[in-house]
Each structure stands twice: as C-alpha cells, then as structure tokens.
Amino acid sequence: YAESTATTQRRYTITVTATDPGGDSASTSFTLDVLHVNHTPTPPPPVPTQVATENQSFTYVVPPFTDRNGDPLTYRWDFGDGSPAEFGATAVHAYSATDIRNFDATLTVTDPMGLSSQSTLLVSVNNTPPAVLITSPAFGSTYAMGGTSTFALTASIGDAESPAADLLCEW
C-alpha cells in the first residue's frame, strides 16, 4: 500500500463593498484559492489464505477499506482465473479447477477522483489446510524453573490431499 494524493484547486474572487449612510461606498476584491487534497483509499489488514471447493460458490468478504476524505468508494474484483470482473464490496464466485490450484483474487478500490488501492487474497481451491494436534507437552503442563530441562515435543498431523510422509512438521 502506497499513499498518494491528488489535489484540485478552485479559484474564487471575493468582493467586499462597504456603504455609509450618506451613500458613499468603497469596494475591494481578493482572490481565494481553495485546495482539496484527496488521499488514496486505505486497505484493511491482510486477509489469511481462504479455502474454496471446486464449482461451489465462494463468498469474498474483506474488511472495509477506509477513505480519509470520506468519499464513496467503488469495488472491483478480479478473481485471478480469467473470469469477468465483479463490482461491489462483497462478491460471490465459483472456481472451476478440478485439481489443487491457487488463485490470487485482487480487490481494487477507487475513489471518485480516481485514486485506488488494492488488496490481494490467496484462494486455494480443492486444498484443505493440514490438521495439527500437539500431543506433547500436554496443554496446561507446568515445568520447574531453573536448570536445563529437556522436553519431548510430539504432534499428530494429517492432510486430506497429501499422505503423512509428504508433510513437514517444524517446531
């Protein structure tokens, strides 16, 4: 995310006229330049990888972008699979991949003056995340302070699409 700004300027001529009770008057004018600084919409924090299933509708819900100017924003979704873009703060899409595939879905948010920001979401189709269960040390275990201690660290891991031998467990 990179902040950028666009500035528009409007020039006004202001004239002040004073008239006394006898009908005498005097006028003076000055020019007033009014600047409007427009800021880029601010994206939300990154969204973690999402998992989708082939040919099933997937609803994109991204935390809202903000605009320091309070301008209304337009939203454009590119799903990363060559399908037509969709417009709106939320979008529903179905991926047609038959194998495990990753797609970068990009949301572009634009303000009325044309400044925009993007947020990209990784969507993993037909690939559920591995399941991890720490079996040792047991949850809630306590250990004595001081000295050197050695602990056995074990976990049970599994994945619906990969055999256990292909999985890596790092501590």
Image (cartoon, grey):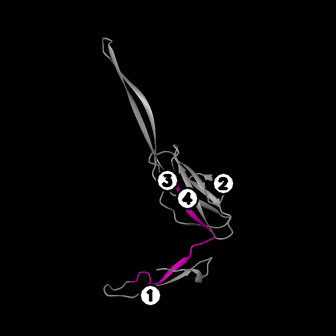
Q: Please state if 126 lies on the left or on the right of 70 as rendered.
A: right
Q: Which residues are magenta?
A: 116-141
Whichever of labels 3 and 2 marks the residue nearer the N terminus, that label is: 3
Whether the residues at callouts 1 and 2 have beta carbons within 8 Å, the answer is: no
Q: Which residue is mark 2?
A: 84
Look at the numbered disc 1 and give the secondary structure of its residue: loop
Q: Which residue is mark 3?
A: 65
For the point 66% across and 57% down, which residue is it?
Answer: 83
Q: Please state if 143 lies on the left or on the right of 168 as rendered.
A: left
Whether the residues at callouts 3 and 1 have beta carbons within 8 Å, the answer is: no
Marks 3 and 1 sit apart, C-alpha to C-alpha, by 45 Å
Q: Nearer the viewer, residue 111 or 142?
A: 111
Queried whether the magenta region covers residue 99, the answer comes back as no
The amino acid marked with disc number 3 is Phe
- Local packing at callout 2 (Cα closer than 10 Å; few below 14, some 14-19, many 20+) is few
Look at the numbered disc 3 and give the secondary structure of its residue: loop
Label 3 or label 4, whichever lies nearer to me, is 3
Please tell me the numbered disc located at residue 152: 1
Look at the numbered disc 2 and give the secondary structure of its residue: loop
The amino acid marked with disc number 4 is Val
The amino acid marked with disc number 2 is Pro
Label 4 or label 2, whichever lies nearer to me, is 2
Whichever of labels 1 and 4 marks the residue nearer the N terminus, that label is: 4
Marks 1 and 2 sit apart, C-alpha to C-alpha, by 52 Å
Please tell me the numbered disc located at residue 99: none
Look at the numbered disc 4 and give the secondary structure of its residue: strand
Q: Which residue is mark 4?
A: 61
